[in-house]
Amino acid sequence: TIPADVSEKILRFARAGIAAATLRGKSYLSMGSVAMGIAGSIVDPEFFEDYFNMRCISVDMSEFIRRVNENIYDPEEFERAMAWIKANCKQYEDIYNGKDGKTPEQQQAIWEYVAKMVIIARDLMIGNPKLAELGFGEEALGHNAIAAGFQGQRQWTDHMPNGDFMETILNSSFDWNGIREAFVVATENDALNGLAMLFGHLLTGTASGFSDVRTYWSPEAVKKATGFDLDVPGMIHLINSGATTMDATGRQNADGKPAMKPFWEISADEAKACLDATSWVPANLGYFRGGGFSSRFLTRGGMPVTMSRINLVKGLGPVLQIAEGYTYEPPKEIHDQLDKRTDPGWPTTWFVPNLTGEGAFKDVYSVMANWGANHGAFNYGHIGADLITMAAMLRIPVCMHNVPEDQIFRPNAWAAFGMDKEGADYRACANFGPLYR
């Protein structure tokens, strides 16, 4: 008979092993041209091969233009997509551009273009046998991608519609073809954040959120800015230009509470509720000159979530950051004022990390101050223990986490590297080296 706590740790270890094994033979598809100024957008093929046994494949963004211009997509699916968009995607007012905004005819053309971008990006990732029937045998194959990233900014978005709609739809668990497994597509081709999204998705079966780790709000700052008192010790504004999964609206209910479910548990009504909670804002032409549409929603509060990110440090290698906490839904009077101070046309998730009173989790500010980049992935549930186990298997040390010690499970060999568990993790990972090197 195995004690319950040991059984649970074995289960987590097995789940992590399954997730790690899933990476084998797959690729990361980089859809971009010249890497952005974000370090995570510079895809390191050797890192992917050594640590994950994954290939990196790069496709220039001009491939989207070629496939649109030469009709290399399923025309029947495109018509179905446009009908679904008309029925389910509510266009919000143009809050950015005033008289300089796109005309209704131009906006309709952009809707058609971004719908094609969704189909083309998916076809690039996993292929589409329909293309072979249309005479495009090579394009029908796809790239066997388990994750992808779209660079977008700035060469693309200075002239073409942005990738927000494409990324939101692919990262969600439903589209015009019904409920299906969410894809993993990193905004701005931040491959390191894409890996964190992938880990969370493989471990939970749920969609992964991609957000900027944008602003820390203390109770004092909230009081000064809005006149209202905050009933949490502070919060972090997770927001991006409109590519966060619609699952993050929290409209999938579990026992009457907001949740993000594995795709096989989502009902049609719950998918529709996520769509109804989302509106689409015409892009700010000040920096998205080609237009586009950004999702706009507020995540419901009370969901347990885990934020994570991989950082790549020269001379050290990869490290993993983990922060367990909860989504928070402030009173409308607070949210509306703070939202306008950042960007009211983008999706918002207010995140309150669990605090330990020391180190990086001394307070909410310390969590953000110790975060390694302005991007973070988040997944439903407190899955920090799963991430720590999988990171050990992949030889990635964890530099920051707030997981209770009795939940942490690493291979027994880690005990040979000292009694300070964090230091032992670093030494063991350095000694054993990447799993696939």
Image (tube, helix red, strand yellow):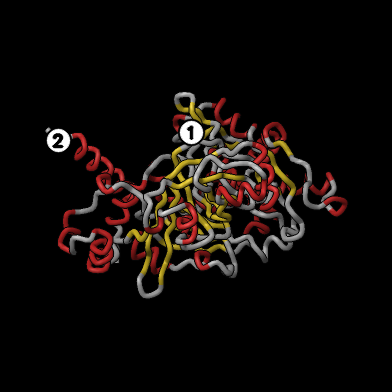
In the rendered image, residue 211, in percent from the top left (x then y), is placed at: 55, 51
* Percent position of residue 227, x then y: 66, 44
| In this view, 239 is above or below 436 | above
Q: Amino acid at mark 1?
A: Ala
Q: Residue at x 44, y 44 (%)?
A: 325
- On the rendered structure, is 289 left or right of 36? right
Which label sits on residue 251?
Answer: none
- The answer to which of marks 2 and 1 sits earlier in the sequence is 2
Residue 6 spot, x, y in % from top left: 19, 40
Quarter-of-image position of residue 274 = top right
SS of the residue under disc 1: strand
Quadrant showing the C terminus: bottom left
- Of residues 169 and 380, the one drawn nearer to the viewer in this rendering: 380
- What's under tag 2, amino acid-wise? Ile
Pick the front one: 191 or 119: 191
Q: Position of residue 145 (x, y in %)?
A: 46, 53
Q: Considering the numbered disc 2 on the image, is that residue within a helix, a strand or a loop? A: loop
Label total for image: 2
Q: Are marks 2 and 1 in contact (CB under 8 Å)?
A: no
Say left or right for 217 vs 198: right
Which quadrant of the structure image shows residue 335? Answer: top right
Q: Which residue is mark 1?
A: 259
Q: Closer to the camera, 416 or 198? A: 416
Asked whether residue 420 appears in the rendered view, the answer is yes
Q: Is residue 281 left or right of residue 422?
A: right
Q: Which corner quadrant holds the N terminus?
A: top left
Badge 2 is on which residue?
Answer: 2
Find the distance from the CA under tag 2 to the CA under tag 1. Answer: 31 Å
Q: Residues within 10 Å of mark 2 (few under 14, many from 20)?
A: few
Residue 271 horizontal side relative to residue 280, left or right? left
Question: How packed is label 1: few (under 14 Cα within 10 Å), some, or many (20 or more)?
Answer: many
Q: Between residues 326 and 122, which one lies in front from this camera angle?
A: 326
